[in-house]
Image (cartoon, helix red, strand yellow):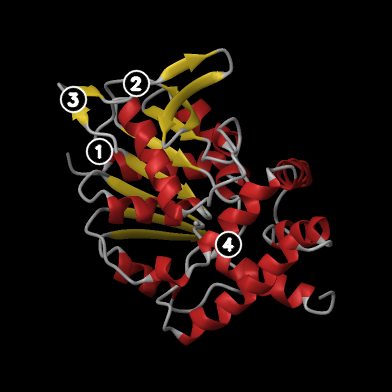
Amino acid sequence: MKKRLPEALRATSVVFVMLFFLLFAGQPLHAASVEENGTYADFDGLRVHYVDEGPRERPALVFIHGWSCDVSFWRFQTEDLRKKFRVIAIDLPGFGLSDKPADRAYTLDLFAGAARAVIKAAGVEHPVLIGHSMGYPVTTKYLALYPGEARAIVNVDGAYFRSPSNPRTIEELKEMNAFLEGLLGPERPQFIGFFIESTFYGRTPQPLRTEIMEKMASADEYAANSSMKEFIVPENWEERSYDVPALAVYSAHEYVPPDHEAYLRTVFPNLTYEEWPDTGHFLMMEAPERFNAVLVKFVEGLPE
């Protein structure tokens, strides 16, 4: 396994860098509960924690974190953009302050349903969904499960596979399964460390590297392992096209395939695309002012 580790991690970073409630009488079926340590929505027997700030009459931006992350990874957005938008950042089940049961699968369906529960509990209609890394496939799963509900999508260095029959996908899934073996094995801490480090591309400032490494390495082990296992299920990656405005912002590096932008345009024909040559995977934390400006421009240009 040690001999396979660097190769598996290198290929895995390509993939990563390249992821009930109806209104009744005009009110959410499940209202939010405000507790001492935050606000929660109920979903499928789970308490889902979220941050909800900003003027209620303004467009709602819903931030969905990536694998083994939490709401704090969006703090540079929520603290700045709450001045002009309603901002909602969600701790997906298994992470942050949300419930972390060790007896269920942490699927993309579960994450999308939890996000919708938060959105309905907050009384929001037609949010802009913003997903980083594994949070991006949560947004596309949301579009597939709840068509017509999202106003737009923002893909922040999102993780994805192409069609399960695509030769590239077949090889990537093999590498991801090797990565999963590492997560489940005795070398798990080393595996996670190498993986996270590989996403910085030598560009992420050291203090931020330390913070990201510590937070991701301390994420709930069962939830992290389960969500990775469910992420690589081939059935999640049947190709679809979505008729909503989309923004994609990626870090430019050697592992980005030449047809990356062209492929994303087949998924989102109405796509605004940017690649940044000077950031790592966590670009919304590394260059928050630039990212926020791009996001504001995109949201303010959306049709009513």
Q: Which residue is mark 3?
A: 24
Q: Which residue is mark 2?
A: 31
Q: Which residue is mark 1?
A: 126
Question: In the rendered view, would you say 254 is above or below 71?
Answer: below
Number of the front mark, 2 or 1: 2
* Mark found first going from the N terminus, 1 or 3: 3
Name the amino acid type tagged 3: Phe
Q: How far apart are labels 3 and 2 at the CA level?
A: 11 Å
Q: How far apart are labels 4 and 1 at the CA level?
A: 30 Å
In the picture as drawn, the residue positioned furthest to the bottom comes out as: 167
- Asked if the residues shown at circle 3 and circle 2 are in contact, with their CB atoms under 8 angstroms apart, the answer is no
* Mark found first going from the N terminus, 4 or 1: 1
* Mark found first going from the N terminus, 4 or 3: 3
At mark 3, the secondary structure is strand
Name the amino acid type tagged 2: Ala
Q: How far apart are labels 4 and 3 at the CA level?
A: 36 Å
User: Quarter of the image containing the C terminus?
Assistant: top left
In the picture as drawn, the residue positioned furthest to the top comes out as: 36
Q: Residue at x 60, y 79 (%)?
A: 174
Question: In the rendered view, would you say 291 is above or below 270?
Answer: above
- Asked if the residues shown at circle 1 and circle 3 are in contact, with their CB atoms under 8 angstroms apart, the answer is no
- Asked if the residues shown at circle 2 and circle 1 are in contact, with their CB atoms under 8 angstroms apart, the answer is no
Q: Which residue is mark 4?
A: 229
Q: Residue at x 57, y 77 (%)?
A: 172
Residue 277 visible in the displayed image: yes
Q: How far apart are labels 1 and 3 at the CA level?
A: 17 Å
